[in-house]
């Protein structure tokens, strides 16, 4: 698979993954039973698996690796934070759901910023 196609696949999965998180969070805040929809339970896992696979493929294709390249290290750490915060934001009995949701959004915004700038500080000095 060519680099351009692989990068486009990765970006598409990022957009879908974030969109699914926003949709599930909105339904959660509205108190609607989104967990009863198999698509909303399974699709995020499928998309995130493809997203991770494309990320690994890009990493090996570009010969840039987490814990070697600072910007990729920052993305991996922020991704772990995003996963933890998003999981808390989507829990049925979550206390402070809004706070977890906002911090998850901040985390994913940081990840996208780092990806675009290839800098853990978004290019700032």
Image (cartoon, rainbow, N blue to C red):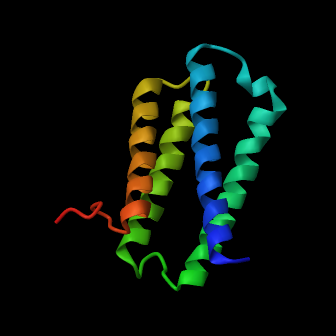
Looking at the image, the residue that sits furthest to the top is: 31
- The percent coordinates of residue 38 (x first, y second) are 83, 33
- Horizontal side, residue 108 vs residue 57: left or right: left
62 lies above or below 34: below
- The percent coordinates of residue 28 (x first, y second) are 60, 21
Q: Which of 27 and 123 is in front in this view?
A: 123
- Horizontal side, residue 86 vs residue 47: left or right: left
Task: Determine the residue positioned at 74% across, 27% down.
Answer: 35
* Residue 50 lies in quadrant: bottom right
Q: Where's the N terminus, which quadrant?
A: bottom right
93 lies above or below 105: above
- Horizontal side, residue 106 vs residue 39: left or right: left
Looking at the image, the residue that sits furthest to the front is: 4
Q: Where's the C terminus, which quadrant?
A: bottom left
Task: Determine the residue positioned at 44% across, 54% down.
Answer: 112
- The percent coordinates of residue 98 (x first, y second) are 43, 25
Q: Which of 35 and 1 is in front in this view?
A: 1
- The percent coordinates of residue 121 (x first, y second) are 27, 62
81 lies above or below 86: below
Task: Determine the residue positioned at 71% across, 51% down.
Answer: 47
């Amino acid at each position: 698979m060519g680099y351009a196609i692989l990068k486009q696949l990765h970006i598409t999965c990022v957009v879908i993954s974030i969109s699914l998180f926003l949709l599930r969070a909105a339904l959660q805040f509205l108190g609607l039973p989104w967990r009863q929809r198999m698509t909303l339970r399974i699709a995020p896992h499928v998309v995130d698996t493809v997203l991770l696979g494309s990320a690994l493929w890009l990493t090996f294709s570009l010969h840039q690796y987490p814990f070697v390249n600072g910007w990729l290290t920052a993305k991996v750490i922020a991704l772990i934070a995003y996963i933890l915060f998003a999981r808390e934001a989507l829990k049925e009995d979550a206390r402070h759901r809004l706070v977890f949701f906002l911090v998850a959004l901040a985390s994913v915004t940081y990840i996208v910023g780092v990806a675009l700038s290839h800098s853990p500080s978004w290019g700032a000095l």
